[in-house]
Structure formats: C-alpha cells, structure tokens
Amino acid sequence: MRPRQTILLGLLLLVPVLAFLFLFRFGSNRYALPTYLPDRVDSTQVGGEWQRDTVFHQIAPFQLSSANGRDVSSRELGQGLYIAQFFGADEASVRVARQLLRVQEKFRHEPRVRLVTFVLNGEPSQTIALTKLAEQYGATAGKWFFLTGAADTLKKLTQQEFRLTADPKRLAGAVYTANIPAGRLLLVDNQRRVRGIYDGTDGREIDRLLTEVTVQLYDYEHPH
C-alpha cells in the first residue's frame, strides 16, 4: 500500500474515534419527561417571528384531612414531587396501593418524593378509617399520605384539576366516587404539573414510574 493511501486510510479510521471522544466528553443525552394536561396555546413574538407555546395546566392548591387528623396542603406535598393515587372501593385500588409500597421503599431516603392516596369514598371525620388504611399498606408517616375531604372538594380536585372523568350515577349521597380508569397513577412535579401517567396495576408501568421519578430528580439537580 502506498504511503499516501496509508495516511488516508488512517485518517478515515481516526475520524469516527475522534467524533466518539468528542461526544463522550462534551455531549449530553437528556431524556425530558413529557408534560400532560395542556390548557391553551399562546403566541409570542421572538426576534420578529411569532412562536406558539403550549401552556400546561397546574393543579390548583388544595388542603385535605390526613390519617393523623391534621390538614395537609398541596404546598407541603409539592416541594419536590408526588405520586398521586385515587383510592376507591375496587380491587384495582388495593393492587395499586400494594405496588406503591415498592415505590415508597425505593425512595424511602429521598425527602423530595412523596406518595399521596386520595381516598374518594371517605369523609374528613373518618380519621380512624384513614389510619387503618395507612397501617394496612405500611405507609411511612411523612412519606405516604392518605387524604380525604368533603365530597365537593374531591369532585373539584378529580374532575377540574386532575381532569379525571366521573359517572353522575355514582354521585348520589354525601360520598363522592370518581369513575377513574382502574389503577391510574399520576406524577406531579414541583410546578404542580402532571409529568407522568401510569397503570399502577402493571409491574412494568411501576418500573417506568421509578425510572421517570429518578429522571425528574436529576432534572432538578441539573436544570437546563
């Protein structure tokens, strides 16, 4: 092989190696979680050109009764992120609550992660029932909250804020029960936006939830 051909071949082999080293040293591979519940699309003028920007829904502040009888606010829950479950009188709710124990154990020592189970067939005065539920599923105080409230408060929270559907035939009486898809879990970030929706009855979906919580925490530590 001629010297000129040898040099050319060497350069051809060297280019991809250099490209790999550059990307490894200076490149970044970030996975950003999607944002759910769009409210509207705004148009803003940047550099003389109009750009469209989607504005996503933020869960309105709320305050509900907890298992130990004190009120817990969304501000307390949302200092980092929280995973929301909607607990009704069905087998799926029981299965999801058992899966949440796995999530609690994974992030037991991570104070920015909270779990919230909204008990839809409870009442503010039923602190004993909430306490029994928390004990039944092994909830850690300050990590996993079982919350309930008045029927109209829960109705507004589930329908208007989390935008979950409800069956009017099931709204008779003082107790409110939402017609929520079985096992639904939602991930809410520190800006009160929904960043993940999962089927809590599916172990693979719980795996995805664990991964995406880790991704969200990484984004908090390494903002764009």
Image (tube, grey):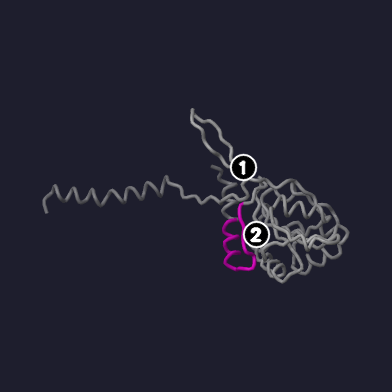
Question: What residue is pinned by disc 2?
Answer: 107
For the record, the magenta segment spans 195-212
Q: Is residue 102 left or right of residue 74?
A: left
Upstream in sequence: badge 2 or badge 1: 1
Q: Is residue 43 magenta?
A: no
The label number, if any, that marks residue 40 in the structure image? 1
Q: Is residue 102 above or below residue 186?
A: below
Q: Nearer the viewer, residue 179 or 133?
A: 179
**Could you tell me which quadrant the N terminus lies in?**
bottom left
Whole-percent x and y of residue 205?
Answer: 59, 64
Q: Quadrant of residue 136?
A: bottom right
Which of the 4 quarters of the picture holds residue 165?
bottom right
Query: Which structural element holds mark 1?
Result: strand
- Residue 220 position in % (x across, y down): 60, 47
Label 1: how many residues lie within 10 Å, few (<14), some (14-19) or many (20+)?
few
Instruction: Look at 70% across and 60% down and name the residue there.
Output: 85
- The amino acid sitting under disc 1 is Arg
